[in-house]
């Protein structure tokens, strides 16, 4: 099943709108009626999420979205209905994926209401601008309305689809707020650092590259190595290793990152050059390394105890932690959602829907092209 994160919800999920073409004016139920072979109408209730009933119109929008996703992900022009996807028959996967998307969107709506997050005037303006963008994109109000109808959408559903990402951003902003309702604890951050194998170390680097990143000559490299040996000698006989290391690091290190990370680096596997990383992980806090050579030069490393406050000040680390916490929070909300599928869902023949929807799109495309030719012909006649 498709795994969504909060960042995905920040997008306006209108892939089928952009992929489709304008369609004929029709009664409200005709789209659902056509793509289900007359088995369903728009207001037939398909399922409920936390007690909120989901009608066929909304469900089929997301079923179409799931189909578009599979086609884009697999780069296939036509879906192979005989194959399995993520261990399930393709039809079952697509229905489950649509239900998952609906659940995720409904949970955001429910949580926004629970915590009192509402649309502000600026948000209403954003929705209006989004609508204006699509009106312009499709070539005017009439074409825009035809486009909505051709995908089984109406203004209410279109607005709902675009409202959820706005409310999601409000929830996420509250998550980032120090006084918000979802602030992770220091204990959770400490566990995150431990579970992900973060360690901390600082080093004195004598670079073996020039300002353009080119290797120094053998003579210059030899001089740098002798300088590293001199520094290591002073450190090995220092009365206060930490103080002496910090002094020599400020005076002699050629690491440009020193100004940004004066207290050393907090990192996990795969984030540092291999010789530096392997050595640091082999050491205990307070231990001094020998001279370590990498493509950047000669390193002398001092392994440091992990400092949670320093790690918290590193945006790369703390932002990753927050994103992980928020993703877990969303997952918990989604897993706790009460989803009830009604028997009428069995009337949805996914292959029939797929083929009927494709046929409607083809017909709409042909009509659009025909209209374009007629308009061009009129224009040429007038000229």
Image: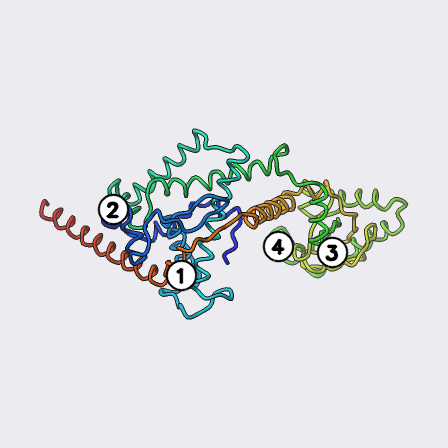
Q: Nearer the viewer, mark 2 or mark 4?
A: 2
Q: Earlier in the sequence, mark 2 or mark 3?
A: 2
Residue farthest to the top? 121
Q: Nearer the viewer, mark 2 or mark 1?
A: 2
Q: Earlier in the sequence, mark 2 or mark 1?
A: 2
Where does residue 292 sit, x and y in percent of width and height? 76, 58
Element type at mark 3: strand
Write down the residue under mark 4.
Answer: 213
Are discs 3 and 1 less than 8 Å apart at CB?
Answer: no
In this view, 36 is above or below 380: below
Q: For residue 110, which numbered disc appears in the image?
A: none
Write down the residue under mark 1.
Answer: 71
Q: Residues within 10 Å of mark 4 (few under 14, many from 20)?
A: few
Q: Nearer the viewer, mark 3 or mark 1?
A: 1
Q: Earlier in the sequence, mark 3 or mark 1?
A: 1
In this view, 140 is above or below 35: above
Element type at mark 1: helix
Q: Earlier in the sequence, mark 1 or mark 4?
A: 1
């Amino acid at each position: 099943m498709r795994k969504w994160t909060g960042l995905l919800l920040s997008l306006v999920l209108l892939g089928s709108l952009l992929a489709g073409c304008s369609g004929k004016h029709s009664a409200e139920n005709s789209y659902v009626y056509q793509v289900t072979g007359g088995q369903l109408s728009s207001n037939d209730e398909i399922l409920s999420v936390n007690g909120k009933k989901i009608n066929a119109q909304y469900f089929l929008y997301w079923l179409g979205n799931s189909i578009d996703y599979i086609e884009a992900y697999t780069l296939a022009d036509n879906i192979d209905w005989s194959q399995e996807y993520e261990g399930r028959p393709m039809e079952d996967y697509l229905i489950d994926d649509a239900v998952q998307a609906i659940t995720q969107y409904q949970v955001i709506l429910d949580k926004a209401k629970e915590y009192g997050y509402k649309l502000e005037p600026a948000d209403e303006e954003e929705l209006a601008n989004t609508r204006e963008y699509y009106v312009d994109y499709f070539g005017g109000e009439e074409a825009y309305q035809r486009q909505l109808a051709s995908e089984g959408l109406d203004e209410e559903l279109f607005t709902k689809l675009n409202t959820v990402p706005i409310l999601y951003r409000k929830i996420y902003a509250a998550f980032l707020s120090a006084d918000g309702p979802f602030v992770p604890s220091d204990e959770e951050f400490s566990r995150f650092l431990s579970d992900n194998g973060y360690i901390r170390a600082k080093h004195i680097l004598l670079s073996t590259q020039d300002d353009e990143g080119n290797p120094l000559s053998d003579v210059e490299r030899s001089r740098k190595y002798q300088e590293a040996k001199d520094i290591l000698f002073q450190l090995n006989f220092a009365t206060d290793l930490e103080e002496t290391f910090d002094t020599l690091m400020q005076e002699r290190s050629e690491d440009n990152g020193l100004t940004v990370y004066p207290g050393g680096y907090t990192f996990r596997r795969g984030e540092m050059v291999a010789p530096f990383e392997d050595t640091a992980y082999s050491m205990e806090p307070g231990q001094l390394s020998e001279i370590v050579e990498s493509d950047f030069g000669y390193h002398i490393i001092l392994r440091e105890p992990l400092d949670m406050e320093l790690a918290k000040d590193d945006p790369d680390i703390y932002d990753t932690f927050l994103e992980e916490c928020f993703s877990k929070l969303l997952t918990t909300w989604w897993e706790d959602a009460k989803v009830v599928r009604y028997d009428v869902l069995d009337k949805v023949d996914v292959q029939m829907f797929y083929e009927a929807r494709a046929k409607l799109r083809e017909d709409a495309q042909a009509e659009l092209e025909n209209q374009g030719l007629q308009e061009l012909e009129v224009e040429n006649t007038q000229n």
